[in-house]
Image (cartoon, grey):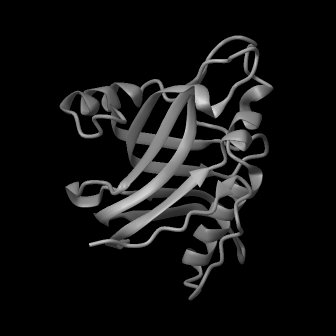
């Protein structure tokens, strides 16, 4: 993957909250909710597809996306936030501790149970100071503690199918429309 540009997916806050409410303890802040994923600038990446071959059957078991190949700065960031409950409600308006994490890699694996996405970050900074030096130290430390977030089965299967399309050198792949992404209309500016 080589190129430059801008693309941003903003996640519907109500859907993100709903995904975690069943495991959320009442009255406890919800932490590190996903706000957006953004690609901005120039980058060099690599996609690794791993799997098995049994007879003539090829099965993709893992797809790894690396965004900072050959020491290039990753153009991928994710926005995170926490929410304090107000009167038992987790409202987006009550968000705080807004963070920006620069992503080194994402990993998707074939599984029988609940799928999770592996995440490795380069830095974690306050949204107000997205490029601070301490963010790299925080990112290095965060990688020891990041629990792979739950993702939808459709999202995980889509990435594995994408990997299979790459393996088969298909000329095109259509991603299904995600249910929890808000439409963004942005015009390029100079």
Quadrant holding the N terminus: bottom left
Residue 93 spot, x, y in % from top left: 60, 31
Q: At 59% from the left edge and 25% from the top edge, which residue is drawn?
A: 94
Examine the image and state in which quarter residue 95 appears: top right
Identify the residue at image location x=72%, y=40%.
14
Q: Which of 91 and 36 is in front in this view?
A: 91
| Number of marks in picture | 0
Instruction: Answer with left or right where residue 111 lies relative to residue 64.
Output: right
In the displayed orientation, state which residue is furthest to the bottom. Answer: 171
Q: Locate the C terminus and report the quarter of the image it occupies.
A: bottom left
Q: Residue 18 in the image: x percent, y percent?
A: 77, 35
Q: Name the residue located 72 percent from the left edge and 74 percent from the top edge.
A: 55
Does residue 91 appear to the left or right of 37 in the view shown? right
Residue 147 shows in this picture: no
Q: Can residue 114 be seen in this view?
A: yes
- Examine the rendered structure and indicate whether residue 46 appears above or below residue 66: below
Q: Position of residue 173 (x, y in %)?
A: 62, 79
Instruction: Decide if residue 107 is on the left or right side of residue 135.
Output: right
The answer to whether residue 168 is above or below residue 50 is: below
Rendering coords of residue 45 (x, y %):
35, 64
């Amino acid at each position: 993957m080589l190129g430059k540009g801008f693309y941003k997916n903003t996640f519907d806050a109500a859907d993100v909250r709903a995904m975690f409410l069943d495991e959320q303890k009442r009255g406890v802040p919800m932490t590190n909710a996903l706000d957006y994923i953004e690609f901005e600038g120039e980058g060099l990446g690599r996609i690794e597809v791993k799997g098995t071959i049994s007879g003539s059957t090829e099965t993709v078991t893992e797809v790894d996306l690396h965004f900072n190949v050959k020491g290039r700065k990753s153009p991928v960031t994710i926005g995170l936030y926490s929410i304090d409950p107000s009167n038992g409600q987790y409202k987006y308006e009550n968000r705080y501790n807004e963070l920006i994490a620069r992503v080194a890699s994402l990993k998707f694996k074939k599984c029988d149970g609940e799928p999770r996405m592996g995440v490795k970050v380069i830095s974690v900074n306050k949204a107000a100071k997205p490029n601070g030096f301490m963010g790299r130290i925080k990112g290095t430390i965060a990688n020891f503690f990041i629990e792979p977030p739950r993702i939808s089965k459709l999202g995980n299967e889509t990435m594995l199918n994408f990997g299979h399309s790459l393996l088969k050198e298909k000329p095109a792949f259509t991603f299904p429309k995600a249910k929890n992404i808000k439409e963004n209309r942005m015009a390029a500016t100079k």
